[in-house]
């Protein structure tokens, strides 16, 4: 294995230092380090952060390899500075057995660009009728700890309660797509003045908040871990704050797009902006940023949702919901959280690496750990970011197999220059190494 000497990087945005990486680990961080035989990486002016961890990625394999594969999604992730991603279960076949989660895990190992951590479905076929084989998935080679029917809500409260009770046995967590389906039939965008004016059926904030309120009560009652996917409303932030103050073991994520974009994007009826939950109001965006800043929302998760052209570039009502996120996630966080003064670089590391890794139980896996500090002895999972460059997003140049980026033509701050997974460069000079 080639050793690397990263020269002049700024760990967590602090004073410049050299980082020596040997045998997959950080060997030393300090001034004017030298090492014979190590490959020198010039990182002058670049910010070093721990490798990012995504709790919510759709890789579409098996089943829709035309939209994304484990390999293409892994490449997009590495280019975005990620070293681990949780692959959502809404594939075809659904990841509801040990066999399917092991298949996804192996494909990730073969691609070798990020650690692909499969999420297991909560219910068989995501149908919301009976529990999937959660224990077998937890015990499999994929060692699943996060379970989700994402794309669908586990709307039956008795089934949700049983899932929460079941995952306690192996320290798992149920990640809920909070959407009361009876309130979102035919919904196309956020319900408000704008949906009425545009003539699109509304998706009310209450459909999300009702499920979060119910689930934090259930999680508190049974003493289990609950994670709330893609929180999108100010009311949800308030409910989470309340639940945490009561000691409920609840965590939550917000997507980059919900931190940046609003329902105003629907004005042109461009389906690239159609997503679940929908883009909300400016007031919601401000509440989400504040919730992420004060830790009420634990993590940023991309909900990277690639869709093939024929599924996305149609009339708004027919288009699938979802948007790309992996390659621009860090830049959107820089724009919405760092440049606004809401988070410093250590805060970015906390919300995009440390806490998501802790939620997915990836922090204590020895050599395979993620979300660890940049410190000697730790696995060398890290990214180097040029914070000064601004990049105009061109969907044609993305590594994803799909093109549905909501940031097309938008200039965003920051560029991931290098990414290392256990000491192996997966991105060098902005290019994937494999
Ligand atoms: N976010 C979306 O709009 N779509 C996701 C499913 C989901 O995250 O609910 C997808 O799988 O395409
Ligand atoms: Zn979802
Ligand atoms: Zn999703």
Image (cartoon, helix red, strand yellow):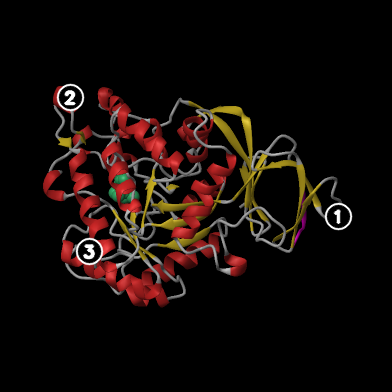
Mark 3: few, some, or many residues within 10 Å (few <14, many ≥20)? many
Residue that label 3 marks: 160
Which residue appears at 52% of the width and 39% of the height? Answer: 330
Q: Which mark is residue 79?
A: none
Q: Residues within 10 Å of mark 2 (few under 14, many from 20)?
A: few
Residue 96's x, y, as percent? 31, 68
Q: Is residue 282 left or right of residue 354?
A: left
User: What label does residue 35 carry, if any?
Assistant: 1
Q: Is mark 1 within 8 Å of ligand 3?
A: no
Q: Are marks 2 and 1 in contact (CB under 8 Å)?
A: no
Going from the N terminus, do you reach mark 3 or mark 2 first? 3
Which secondary structure is most common in the magenta stretch? Answer: loop
Q: Which residue is mark 2?
A: 193
Name the residue nearer the viewer: 406 or 291: 291
Sequence-first disc among 2 and 1:
1
Ranked by sequence position, the earlier of labels 1 and 3 is: 1
Q: Quadrant of the N terminus?
A: bottom right
State which region is magenta: 1-5
Taking depth in this image into account, of 266 and 212 the one nearest to the observer is 212
In contact (CB < 8 Å): disc 1 and disc 3: no
Residue 234, x across and y down, in percent: 29, 37
Q: In this image, 354 relative to 2: left or right?
A: left
Q: Between 228 and 105, which is closer to the camera in this rendering?
A: 228
């Amino acid at each position: 294995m080639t050793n690397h000497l990263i020269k002049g990087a700024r760990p967590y945005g602090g004073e410049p230092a050299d980082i020596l990486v040997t045998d997959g680990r950080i060997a030393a961080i300090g001034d004017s380090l030298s090492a014979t035989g190590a490959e020198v990486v010039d990182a002058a002016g670049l910010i070093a952060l721990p490798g990012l961890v995504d709790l919510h990625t759709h890789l579409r394999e098996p089943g829709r390899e035309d939209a994304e594969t484990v390999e293409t999604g892994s490449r997009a992730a590495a280019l975005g500075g990620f070293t681990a991603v949780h692959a959502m279960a809404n594939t075809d076949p659904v990841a509801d057995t040990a066999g399917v989660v092991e298949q996804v895990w192996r494909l990730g190992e073969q691609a070798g660009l990020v650690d692909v951590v499969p999420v297991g479905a909560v219910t068989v076929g995501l149908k919301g009728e009976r529990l999937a084989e959660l224990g077998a998935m937890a015990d499999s080679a994929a060692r699943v700890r996060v379970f989700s029917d994402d794309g669908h809500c586990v709307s039956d409260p008795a089934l949700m309660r049983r899932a929460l009770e079941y995952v306690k046995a192996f320290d798992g967590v149920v990640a809920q797509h909070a959407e009361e389906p009876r309130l979102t039939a035919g919904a196309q965008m956020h319900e408000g003045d704008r949906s009425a004016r545009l003539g699109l059926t509304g998706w009310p904030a209450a459909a999300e908040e009702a499920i979060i309120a119910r689930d934090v009560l259930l999680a508190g009652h049974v003493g289990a871990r609950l994670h709330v996917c893609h929180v999108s409303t100010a009311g949800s932030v308030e409910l989470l704050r309340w639940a945490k103050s009561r000691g409920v073991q609840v965590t939550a994520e917000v997507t980059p797009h919900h931190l940046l974009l609003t329902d105003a994007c629907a004005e042109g009826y461009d389906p690239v902006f159609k997503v679940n939950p929908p883009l909300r109001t400016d007031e919601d965006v401000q509440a989400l940023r504040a919730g992420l800043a004060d830790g009420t929302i634990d993590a940023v998760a991309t909900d990277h949702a690639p869709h093939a052209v024929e599924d996305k570039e149609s009339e708004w009502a027919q288009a699938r919901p979802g948007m790309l996120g992996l390659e621009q996630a860090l830049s959107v966080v820089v724009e919405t959280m760092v440049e606004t003064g809401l988070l410093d670089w250590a805060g970015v590391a906390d919300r995009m690496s440390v806490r998501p890794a802790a939620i997915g139980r990836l922090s204590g896996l020895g050599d395979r750990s993620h979300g660890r500090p940049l410190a000697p002895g730790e696995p060398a999972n890290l990214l180097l970011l040029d914070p000064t460059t601004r990049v105009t997003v061109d969907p044609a140049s993305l590594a994803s197999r799909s093109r549905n980026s909501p940031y097309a033509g938008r200039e965003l701050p920051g560029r991931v220059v290098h990414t290392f997974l256990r000491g192996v460069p997966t991105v060098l000079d902005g290019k994937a190494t494999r």
